[in-house]
Image: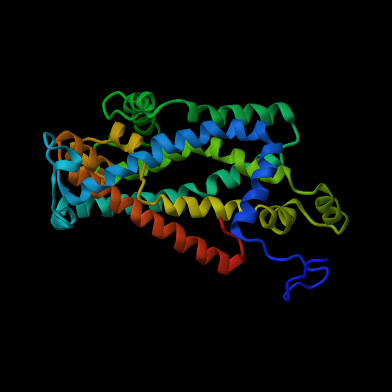
Amino acid sequence: MSKKKPQNAVAGIPQKQTWWQSFIADFAGYKKQYALVLMFIPVVVYFAVFKYIPMGGIVMAFKDYKIRQGIWGSDWCGLENFTKLFATNTFARAVENTLEISLLRIICGFPVPIILALLLNEVNNEKFKKAVQTITYLPHFISWVVLAGLFQQLLSPSNGAVNSILGTLFNMEPIYFLGDNDYFRGTLIVTDIWKGAGWASILYLAAISGIDPSLYEAAKCDGATKLQCTRYITLPCIAATITVMLILEIGGILDAGFDQVFNLYNSAVYETADIIDTYVYRYGIGEMKYAMGTAVGLFKNGIGFILVLGTNAITKRINGNGIW
């Protein structure tokens, strides 16, 4: 005796699977790709151990943390840590500095890797192209600890090479690049671009290499110049990559570069250089105010999460591209 078909079944139209059926089907597919699954396990373990398990410590932001009592033994204080945090002028200054430095990084630094990738794409001499790539990639592999010492020597007002050149060519007075609030932020932006532009351009070069060459050939047959090919073919084809990177940059707007700032700043430029991360380091770790430091970290990550969602929604409305 034949089984009755469901009343909602229509010939030729697949029925919607339940979540359990979908899970079983996906699991069967993963079994066939067990080698890839094994390669993915270390990634899962890394994020579980170093990203998700430590999230349990977030509860410290809502407690009057005492070292002897531990996280779970300390008394609850609700939003008291956040209230104290927002009432301090130093934290407000740190937030303002973080936003200004990050916005300057995005405005001045974000287009540089794209422009560099576009220029390298037009170079026909392979030896020259590889030499430029090597030179621009190299600073990425040097830590800010080493670079800080290098820049302190180069930018020294007494015997630094930069001030010596400026004095010789333009008869200028020595500039305190790392000790003057008027120059410190500009120094941060320029050194950050110098260090990261070459490495960041790799992603855009990879995106450009995936463009169909026949598009350029057809454009050249129609008489398009290189600039027109870049404007009407290259940039639209890598727009999705640019959009994703911009979303990630805006999502991390409260990360103004702790390594760089911490190694280059000093007490003379706290007014314009003290950012959220250095504030947390000094007060959260240096003065052992762990609950306050955790509250700052939670505040920063919450704002970053909201910015990622908002930027993703806006870019999807504008050009249809987004992370999800």
Query: Which of these two is toward me, 138 or 323?
Result: 323
Query: Which of these two is toward me, 310 or 105?
Result: 310
- Direction from residue 157 to residue 227 in the image, left or right: right
Query: Picture coordinates of residue 204 (x, y %)?
Result: 62, 44
Determine the residue located farthest toward the right in the rendered image. Answer: 221
**At 38% across and 37% down in the image, what residue appears?**
170
Q: Quadrant of the C terminus?
A: bottom right
Determine the residue located farthest toward the front in the rendered image. Answer: 1
Q: Is residue 171 visible?
A: no
Query: Which of these two is toward me, 237 or 180?
Result: 237
Q: Is 231 placed above or below 3 here?
A: above
- Direction from residue 31 to residue 99 in the image, left or right: left
Q: Quadrant of the N terminus?
A: bottom right
- Direction from residue 221 to residue 155 in the image, left or right: left
- Direction from residue 252 to residue 214 in the image, left or right: right
Query: Picture coordinates of residue 27 (x, y %)?
Result: 64, 44
Q: Is 205 placed above or below 126 here?
A: below
**At 51% across and 65% down in the image, what residue appears?**
313
Query: Which of these two is toward me, 279 or 32?
Result: 32
Determine the residue located farthest toward the bottom in the rendered image. Answer: 7
Q: Is residue 110 visible?
A: yes
**At 73% across and 72% down in the image, what residue appears?**
6
Query: Picture coordinates of residue 51 (x, y %)?
Result: 40, 40
Query: Picture coordinates of residue 168 (x, y %)?
Result: 37, 30
Q: Is 8 placed above or below 140 here?
A: below
What's the colour scheme? rainbow
Q: How many marks?
A: 0
